[in-house]
Image (cartoon, grey):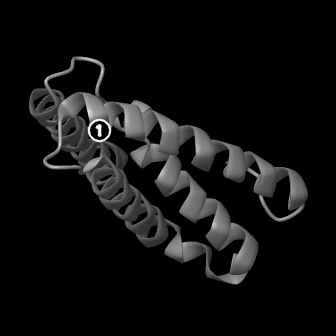
Amino acid sequence: HTIVWDLRLPRIIVGLIVGMCLAVSGSIMQGVMKNPLADPGIIGVSAGAAFMAVIIMIVLPQYILLLPIAAFTGGFVTAMLIYGLAWQNGSSPSRIILVGVAVNSVIGAAMSALMLLFSDRVQAV
């Protein structure tokens, strides 16, 4: 009884709330970009977050608790970079998507190279 009410139920509720927030944020992103394919994985925000997590694992492995903060920062910086690169006399949704795909590819390649070079420090990314 205690396990269900004190452990399982709070996790289920938090999971439901996080899922709803992710659905709303994805819907907002698709509405702003006017593209049903727009998501953080295609635009490059997820790659930026993962890249910062890999950097923390390589440079500061003793501070593994900084991973969520570093991932959030990496995603935010990548989003700002994509928006800055796509800005040219105003920003269009198609330009943001194209720049995001390019940035996603570059960051993914850099992350793969770092994971290959420092495979002893990066275990489970």
> What residue is shown at x 59% (from left), y 49% (from top)?
107
Please provide percent x and percent y for residue 20. Answer: 16, 35
Instruction: Give the vertical position of 20 relative to 72 (above or below).
Output: above
- The N terminus lies in quadrant: top left
Rendered image quadrant of residue 40: top left
Amino acid marked by disc 1: Ile
- Camera-nearest residue between 118 and 63: 118
Which residue of the protein is positioned furthest toward the top in this rendering?
36
Q: Is residue 79 left or right of residue 31?
A: right
Residue 80 in view in this figure: yes
Residue 41 in view in this figure: no
Instruction: Give the vertical position of 54 relative to 116 (above or below).
Output: below
| Total labels drawn | 1
Which residue of the protein is positioned furthest toward the front in this rendering?
89
Q: Is residue 16 left or right of residue 77?
A: left
> What residue is shown at x 30% (from left), y 47% (from top)?
86
Q: Is residue 86 left or right of residue 109?
A: left
> What residue is shown at x 38% (from left), y 64% (from top)?
77
Instruction: Give the vertical position of 53 relative to 103 (above or below).
Output: below
- Camera-nearest residue between 32 and 57: 32
Rendered image quadrant of residue 38: top left
Please provide percent x and percent y for residue 114. Answer: 78, 57
Please provide percent x and percent y for residue 2. Answer: 31, 51
Q: Residues within 10 Å of mark 1 (few under 14, many from 20)?
A: many
Which residue lies under the disc numbered 1? 96
- Camera-nearest residue between 11 and 77: 77
Q: Is residue 64 left or right of residue 115?
A: left
Secondary structure of the residue carrying tag 1 is helix
